[in-house]
Image: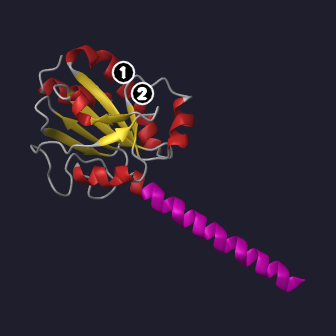
Amino acid sequence: MKTIIIAVIAIAAAAGGFFLQQNLISEKIVTKPHTSRPTVSVVGQIRPDFTLPDIEGTQRNVKEWDGKIKLINFWATWCPPCLREMPAFIEMQEQFAEKDFVVLGIAVDRKDAVETFLETMDINYPILIGDAAALELTSLYGNRLGVLPFSVFVGKDNKIISVHNGEITAETIKSILLSQNVK
């Protein structure tokens, strides 16, 4: 009996240690220090092309938003900093939509998880579903570390203006828009 109890405790401790390790690793990935410099600079380059489905399953190409300043935000439902920055995106989309600005949210997540999450938020900008393939897309946009959230500003000329690893604020967004003469 004593041996069985020790075995159960050892198995529970091992499982708990594995779970803790996985969560700590995920948290480290999500909460890397904020920086506006990727490992390899893509600033000044033409933005990579992509086509992804929206929440209804319609294929959408980034070219649909050419001629606008784009804030392309890679996020996931399981990423706390991603969720904290969403109210700023909603506010900026509302404030600057008439000024040729659009936020594009790209979920690095499963469609069902995104659908469930969107039932709780009143998002006013397009959400595209990238699933695991979106991580590869973030790399093309300069995210060599796989950090989430990851945001990219693209100018009206389709050149990358700025990239941001980690959570971004409304003040930072406004500052970048002002640098592009959006008022």
Residue 24 can be seen in this image: yes
Q: CA distance from mark 2 to mark 1?
A: 6 Å
Please state which amino acid type lies under the numbered disc 2: Pro
Q: Position of residue 119 (x, y in %)?
A: 56, 29
Q: Which mark is residue 91?
A: 1
Residue 147 can be seen in this image: no
Q: Answer with left or right where residue 114 lies relative to residue 180.
A: right
Quadrant of the rendered structure where residue 175 is?
Answer: top left
Q: Position of residue 71 (x, y in %)?
A: 26, 33
Please state which amino acid type lies under the numbered disc 1: Glu
- Quadrant placement of the N terminus: bottom right
Specify the principal SS of the magenta part: helix
Specify the color scheme: secondary structure
Residue name at image x 31 percent, y 55 percent: 136
| Residue at which label 2 appears | 87
Q: Answer with left or right where residue 58 lies relative to residue 46.
A: right
Q: Tell me where the magenta segment starts and ends, as one range.
A: 1-28
Residue name at image x 23 percent, y 25 percent: 174
Q: What secondary structure is marked by label 2? A: helix
- Determine if the magenta segment contains residue 15: yes
Q: Position of residue 26 (x, y in %)?
A: 47, 58
Q: Is residue 8 above or below residue 58?
A: below
- Of residues 33 and 173, the one nearer the viewer is 173
**Residue count near mark 1 (Cα–Cα under 10 Å), binned few <14, some 14–19, many ≥20:** some
Residue name at image x 23 percent, y 48 percent: 141
Quadrant of the rendered structure where residue 52 is?
Answer: top left
Asked whether the beta carbons under mark 2 and mark 1 sit within 8 Å of each other, the answer is yes
Q: Which mark is residue 158?
A: none
